[in-house]
Amino acid sequence: MAESNTDTKSSNQMWGGRFASGPDAIMEEINASIGFDKKLFAQDIRGSIAHATMLAHQGIISAEDKDKIVHGLNTILSEIEGGNFEFSRRLEDIHMNIEARLATLIGPAAGRLHTARSRNDQVALDFRLWVKEELQKTEQMLTGLIAAFLDRAEEHAESVMPGFTHLQTAQPVTFGHHCMAYVEMFGRDRSRVRHAIEHLDESPIGAAALAGTGYPIDRHMTAKALGFREPTRNSIDTVSDRDFAIEFLAIAAITGMHLSRLAEEIVIWSTPQFGFIRLSDAFSTGSSIMPQKKNPDAAELVRAKTGRINGSLIALLTIMKGLPLAYSKDMQEDKEQVFDAAESLELAIAAMTGMVRDMTVNTASMKAAAGSGFSTATDLADWLVREAGLPFRDAHHVTGRAVALAESKGCDLAELPLADLQAIHSAITDKVYDVLTVEASVASRKSFGGTAPSEVRKQIAFWRARN
Ligand code: ARG
């Protein structure tokens, strides 16, 4: 039965003892995961080396067999890394592909590796290790994106732009302040990533099929060897838990949501109508028919990838809902969702970091837009409260009349003659013009977390020190 790889009629060499014949072709196709779980080869080999080393340390297998196993596994690692490994669908998954190859390489000692272990704790281990590494990579990439925003914020701590609510001009802000809003968002994402790494930092290996094992294994030893804080505490939960994968997808979905909001802003800002930024040639594309065009394709694709990531989150939640404890084969469908989302997320963060670093900021058009749309109306109302003692509601009403007048005259608030303003409210003096400029408006908003350049610089310093 050992050489059954090419014989489609024979039963599975790993678990086929009680089976008279091999699987139907459709059974093989629906059952196999090797097409995607081969991505876990390095984690699988690391896990097996740690397990075999522990088995020998505990006297469960001989030191000689352990040495053969470790040597064989390292050989397989270089074979796979070098592209010299033939994956077989008949062997279902990465675990059995590696174990079968080990048997060919080292003979009967290979059969001792699976002592006190099941594929249920093995796959839980491999996948956790993979997700942990992916989270660490995500943390670094988010740090890179945050750094890009901190640099742009520093450069533009004083550059005024219109701030929007309902995408209508609201109050002037600085571009630096706007950049720092994204620093806060991606900073929260990064801290979610850090918490997720803490949550998953427990080693599943040794839970075996679901009940633990009668062999005198040392789970603390394998946990330590594999870089986990400690072993998991309940063997049933261990083999049925995919929270770590769902948490990764939830974080990816939230981060994706942030990235797609940024993408949308980039799309809007780079239109000739807004003209706030110009994307670099490196991060835009042309049109095959309209020579004048420069399209923000990367931003649009980031916006779309977010939909894909959301799909993966919902898919895995739906796969897991209603599953009885402990392991069910449904759970094999966890990996493609996570792999696909991870690829999309990495690409999206990398593309955004590039766009933010490379884009040209058009401070002149931002400033012109900041001054239009009566963006300093609130400053006029605040002046009436402060200097003329009006209740804010009355000041709001008076300002509304001034806005209506300016609108009917086709001018800005700052361009209304004093006589006009005094006709609306007699307490207005020519001092009011000091607060009607966008620079004065922005500089006055010194409340903690406000848009004044001095505040923005404090927030930049906070984030630079935090990292
Ligand atoms: N390929 C399987 C998975 O990804 C490995 C675990 C199989 N366990 C089992 N009892 N059939 O979930």
Image: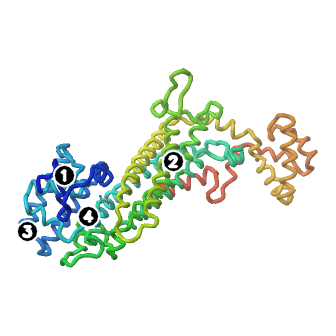
Q: Is residue 196 visible?
A: yes
Q: Residues within 10 Å of mark 1 (few under 14, many from 20)?
A: some
> Answer yes or no: do the residues labelled 4 and 3 have beta carbons within 8 Å?
no
Of pointers 4 and 3, the one earlier in the residue sequence: 3
Nearest the eye: 332 or 286: 332
- Quadrant of the picture in which ligand 1 is shown: bottom left
Considering every residue shown, the one lying at the far front of the view is 20
Nearest the eye: 241 or 20: 20
Q: For marks 2 and 3, give the one nearer the viewer.
A: 2
224 left or right of 149?
left
Residue 381 against residue 50 in the figure, above or below: above
- Which disc number belongs to residue 307? 2
Of pointers 2 and 3, the one earlier in the residue sequence: 3
- Which disc number belongs to residue 119? 4
Of pointers 2 and 1, the one earlier in the residue sequence: 1
- Which disc number belongs to residue 243? none
Label 2 and label 3: CA atoms lie apart by 51 Å
Q: Residues within 10 Å of mark 2 (few under 14, many from 20)?
A: some
- Residue drawn at 44 percent across, 58 percent down: 316
Q: Position of residue 222 (x, y in %)?
A: 23, 69
Label 3 and label 1: CA atoms lie apart by 37 Å
- Label 4 residue near ligand 1, CB within 8 Å: yes
**Residue under pointer 3:** 63
**Residue under pointer 1:** 9
Of pointers 1 and 4, the one earlier in the residue sequence: 1
Q: For marks 3 and 1, give the one nearer the viewer.
A: 1
Mark 1 secondary-structure assignment: loop
Label 4 and label 3: CA atoms lie apart by 23 Å
Residue type, mark 2 in image: Gly
